[in-house]
Amino acid sequence: MLSKWGWIGCVCMLGWCSALSAATGFPTSLHNDTLGKSQLYAVSDTLVKPVITMVADSIALQSRETVLPQPVKVVWWAAAIPGYGQILNRKYWKLPIVYAGFMGCYFAINWNSNRYVSYKNGYLDITDADAATTSYLDLIPEGRTMESYGGQTAFTGLLKSGMEQSRYYRDLSVIISIAYYGLTIIDAFVDAHLADFDISPDLSLQLRPMINREHGTRYNVSSGYSYGLMGRVKF
């Protein structure tokens, strides 16, 4: 809708048109007055139509401004609800990519965390003095024994190595997940800023091969050809 000053301006313009019509002496009845009709059409073309066009442009501009996403609002919503920034920007095709990435990060964190807990419990059980704690036996594949890994000492080293490796990949998965989360926010912020960015079709770059014949100089009568690439940018 138009603002208060927009309506005041429209009323003033229409009042000015009415006053100008009265000052020019338009007849009160134009049913049978051809000259009055032509004058009225002339005033309509020169004064009334520009006012109507101005009002329509103002409405279209305001409606466009209300449709364009607000970058600050998009950032806050994208931070609160992953993927909602892409929805506000109407980039619905990015939603499967966003949520697939989050699902992959969740799977990586969960997988490495479970492996870390298993290796940690197994390492603690094999190094304590309690013979009843044997969770490390669950880590041995079926058909194999501890002796196939080189005995208890070597198997203990494998458990410790697996625990440290799983912890490293778990922490790395968390860092990658945070970075991916920030990337989705940045993507939504950039899309919101570039929502009204228009690339004109006149912007173009043309490239074509070029063959140039080189003529000999005064002391060098030989000539030849040079090959290259010529570009032209159109603004």
Image: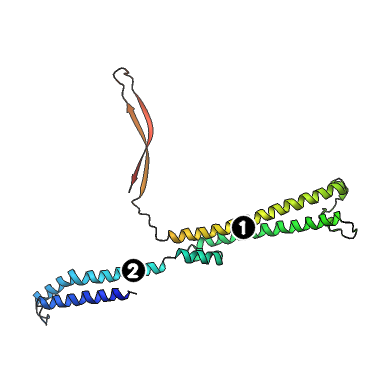
Residue 21, percent from left and from top:
13, 76
- Locate residue 219: give its quadrant: top left
For the point 58% across and 57% down, the residue is: 180
> Quadrant of residue 57 in the image?
bottom left
Residue at x 61% of width, y 57% of height: 177
Work out whether residue 163 or residue 226 is closer to the camera in this orientation and state it. 163
* x and y percentages locating residue 141 in the rendered image: 82, 53
Alpha carbon separation for disc pair 2 and 1:
42 Å
Q: Secondary structure at mark 1?
A: helix
Q: Is residue 49 above or below residue 233?
A: below
Q: Quadrant of the N terminus?
A: bottom left
Residue situated in front as seen by the camera: 22 or 76 = 76
- What SS does tag 2 mark? helix
Q: Is residue 171 left or right of residue 48?
A: right
Mark seen at residue 177: 1
Identity, as a three-letter code, of the amino acid under mark 1: Ser
According to the picture, the residue beneath numbered tag 2 turns out to be: 60
Left or right of 63 on screen, residue 86: right
Q: Position of residue 75 (x, y in %)?
A: 50, 63
